[in-house]
Amino acid sequence: MRPFSERLISWDQCEIESQGGLQSSAKVSEQWLECAAWCHFQIQGSSSMSQNCVLEVEVCSLYEAAFEEARRHRWIESQKRGYDLGNEGFFEWYDRYWWDFLRYRHLEHLLGDYRWLEFSTDAFGVLAPLVDCQDEIASEVIDLYRQGCENLDILNWAIRNCQCMDGVFECLVLINMNDARIDPRFN
C-alpha cells in the first residue's frame, strides 16, 4: 500500500477527470473525497489528520503482521537448517526482531503511512506536517529514532550539536516512544 499522500490526486485532476468522463463517477467521487480530506488536513493542521483521514487508510494489526513476519522467519531458517524449527523459530524472531519491528511500525503510524490498530488514533500522522515542511530538526530526530536511539540519546545529540531544544522536545513529545513499548502476544 502506498503512503496516503502519494495516493492523492489534485483538485484539478479530479475536475478534469470528472468532466472528461475518464473514470466512473464513483471513482471520481472517491478521489475527490481523498482530496478534500487531505486539503482539510493541510489547512487545519495535524489534529484533523486523525479525525478526517483515518478512514482513508487501511487499519492493520501489529500482532497479525508480526506473526506473518515470524512465520516467514521460521520458514527461511528451517530451510537453511534442513529441519522444521517449530515454535523455536517463532520465539527466535520475537527475541531478535520484535522491538525493531515495533519501532518501525510506530514510525509508519506517526508519519501517516500505515495505521496500526494498537497505536493511538490521535497519534496517526502527527509527524507528517513536520516532514512535509522539511523541518531539519524533526528530520534528524526521526532518523535518530529510526536508528534505535532513545530519548536520552537524542537529547545528548541535541546538546552536542547545539540544536534548538524546544524543537527537539516538541518532536520527542510527538513521537512518544513509550507508545511503542508493547509486549509481544503469543497465542
Image (cartoon, grey):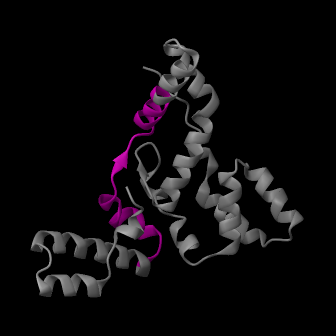
> Could you tell me which residue is drawn at 53 percent across and 75 percent down?
132
Q: How many marks?
A: 0
> Could you tell me which residue is drawn at 33 percent across and 67 percent down?
52
Q: Position of residue 144 (x, y in %)?
A: 71, 56
Q: Is residue 149 magenta?
A: no
Query: With 145 as the anchor, is 112 left or right in this view?
Result: left
Q: Is residue 68 magenta?
A: yes
> Could you tell me which residue is drawn at 69 percent across and 62 percent down?
141
Q: Position of residue 82 (x, y in %)?
A: 54, 14
- Quadrant location of the N terminus in the rendered image: bottom left
Query: With 137 as the anchor, is 12 left or right in this view?
Result: left
Q: Position of residue 85 (x, y in %)?
A: 52, 14
Res 169 quadrant in image: bottom right
Q: Position of residue 54 (x, y in %)?
A: 35, 59
Q: Main secondary structure of the magenta part?
A: helix
Q: Reply above or below: 24 against 186.
A: below
Q: Reply above or below: 102 against 112.
A: above
Q: Reply above or below: 100 against 51.
A: above
Nearest to the observer: residue 12 or residue 130: 12
Query: With 93 as the anchor, is 17 left or right in this view?
Result: left
Nearest to the observer: residue 90 or residue 36: 90
> Could you tell me which residue is drawn at 30 percent across and 61 percent down?
56
- Quadrant location of the C terminus in the rendered image: top left
Stretch in magenta: 44-71
Nearest to the observer: residue 23 or residue 127: 23
